[in-house]
Amino acid sequence: MTEITTNDRTYKVEQDKENLQINGNKANLDIKQLRAGSFSVISNNKNYQIEVIEANYTTKQFTLKVNGKRFELKAQSELDKLLEKLGMDTQAATLVKDLKAPMPGLILAIQTEEGQQVNEGDTLLILEAMKMENVIKSPREGVIKSIKAKTGENVEKNQLLITFE
């Protein structure tokens, strides 16, 4: 189960191979991708236009526009909640030495360079995966030691992209 929090609401989301349940209710969704990062979703005879503004897979935080209204989302699995309770969530990010691809995709742009000082949350590169542009941000403050990927390169999941000093 994953909890998705936006504003003051929390949703419990469960998914198996065939069903998606939100707060224990089966969700019947008709999802059509319009273009990279843009979707049309029909639920209960209502149409929603959804645009992915930002997706940070490291922190599991996402910014969406739904019918023009902006939403900040945070996803947490049971393991994420346990690590947070134990105080291990932020500590892990500060110890990151290597940034690896969260999924297979195509490097569209690299927005940093070797030797550059970056802050946590700074955009490092853009990775296109499943026709969506994903902004990969720095998980920590530090200096870029080396960049192992090149613009236009296809990368595999867990492939080393950037190392920190």
Image (cartoon, grey):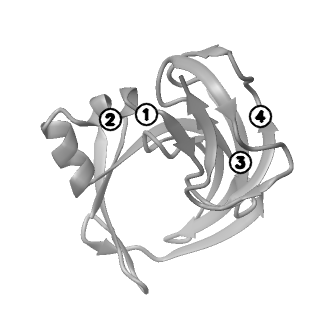
Of callouts 2 and 3, which one flags the residue occurring earlier in the amino acid sequence? 2
Q: Would you say the residues marked 1 and 3 are in contact, meaning their CB atoms lie under 8 Å apart? A: no
Disc 2 vs disc 3: which is toward the camera? 2
Q: Are marks 1 and 4 in contact (CB under 8 Å)?
A: no
The CA span between labels 2 and 3 is: 23 Å
Q: In the picture provided, is 159 more to the left or to the right than 81?
A: right
Q: Which residue is mark 2?
A: 92
Disc 1 and disc 2: Cα gap in Å? Answer: 7 Å
Residue lying furthest bottom: 18
**In the depicted structure, whether residue 132 falls above or below residue 81:** below
**CA gap, disc 2 to disc 4?**
24 Å
What is the tally of numbered marks visible in this picture? 4
Q: Which residue is located at x 30 percent, y 43 percent?
A: 9
Type of the residue with mark 4: Ile
Give the label, 3 or 4, closer to the camera.
Answer: 4
Q: Is residue 68 visible?
A: no
Q: CA distance from mark 1 to mark 4?
A: 19 Å
Q: Amino acid at mark 3?
A: Leu
Residue at (72% x, 41% y) in the render: 126
Name which residue lies at 75% across and 60% down: 131
Badge 4 is on which residue? Answer: 110
Q: Earlier in the sequence, mark 1 or mark 3?
A: 1
Tell me the crowding category of disc 1: few under 14, some 14 to 19, or many 20 or more residues within 10 angstroms, Cα based.
some
Local secondary structure at mark 2: helix
Q: Mark 2 and mark 1 in contact (Cβ < 8 Å)?
A: yes
Observer able to see residue 48: yes
User: What residue is disc 3 on?
Assistant: 127
User: Which quadrant would residue 116 be assigned to in this image?
Assistant: top right
Q: Position of residue 5 (x, y in %)?
A: 34, 44
Q: Is residue 91 above or below residue 77?
A: above
